[in-house]
Image: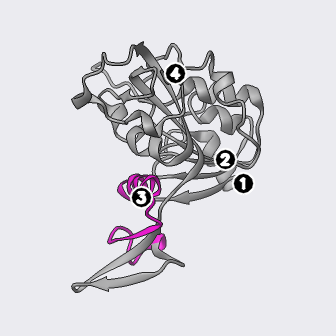
Amino acid sequence: MINKVVASADEAIRDVQDGMTLVVGGFGLCGIPENLIAALVRRSVKGLTCVSNNAGVDDWGLGLLLQTHQIRKMVSSYVGENSEFERQYLSGELEVEFVPQGTLAERMRAGGSGIPAFFTPAGYGTQVAEGKETREFDGKHYVMERGILGDFSFVAAWKADRMGNLVFRKTARNFNPMAATAGKICIAEVEELVEVGELDPDQIHTPGVFVHRVVVAPRSKRIEQRTVRK
């Protein structure tokens, strides 16, 4: 039987090289592959392009890779919680491509589906459309966006079986399913591993055909902002 489980996060990312493009799942600090990111820090790969909804915070998530200057370019839709990101961008140390959130999700999905490009109305007439092809369909204007396909995709799931079938939980489902398909090699870190046949087929969000490696790793539940009554 196929068994995609590897022993550790360090083993899972063993062939990530300098200059590669990584598609990273997660929404804020929810559903981010924190153990795989930590393994990248230990591996000290440089010049990475990271495609992710956000850039983590200063001391967690992709913010750890920013601290060690391992990221050359970020492709994101929201980066408002990371002061180191701001510093590197304003100083010219970090290249940034801002993408509308829905467009970013669709670019991942398109890349994973073998679709090289698509047209969307989001961003038409703004800086987002500069340098891009635009067309008119049925009286409305659209911007052409390219699908994204990275060298690797990193995702964090709730459950998986040994064949790589994945189940995401709640907000973690926002970007992870699309990100999982958008890498030539998909690595998933999971909270719980079950045997093949134990997952309800109707509840599988990412089929194992898209997943190449699975690592079981403990995960922390961090909150970006906590607001309470006085």
Q: Residue 122 placed where, x, y %?
A: 35, 67
The residue that label 3 is drawn on is: 110
Q: Which kind of residue does numbered mark 2 sit on? A: Arg
Residue 225 inside the magenta-drawn segment: no
- Answer with mark 3 or mark 2, whichever residue precedes in sequence: 2
Q: Of the residues tagged 3 and 1, which is closer to the observer?
A: 3
Badge 4 crowding class, 10 Å Cα cut-off, few under 14, some 14 to 19, many 20 or more, is few
Residue type at tag 1: Ser
Question: In the drawing, does residue 119 fall left or right of residue 57?
Answer: left
Q: Which residue is mark 4?
A: 3
Tell me which segment is drawn in magenta. 101-128
Q: Secondary structure at mark 3?
A: helix
Q: Nearer the viewer, residue 218 or 95?
A: 218
Q: Earlier in the sequence, mark 4 or mark 1?
A: 4
- Judged by depth in the image, the label closer to the viewer, 4 or 1, is 4
The dot on residue 87 is 2
What's the CA distance linking mark 3 and mark 2? 32 Å
Are the two marked residues, 4 and 2, in contact with CB atoms closer than 8 angstroms?
no
The residue furthest front is: 1
74 in relation to 201, above or below: below
Say which mark, if any, is on residue 91: 1
- Front one among 186 and 228: 186
Q: Nearer the viewer, mark 3 or mark 2?
A: 3
Residue 16's disc is none
Give the residue drawn at x 54%, y 78%: 131
Tell which circle, 4 or 2, labels the residue nearer the N-terminal end: 4
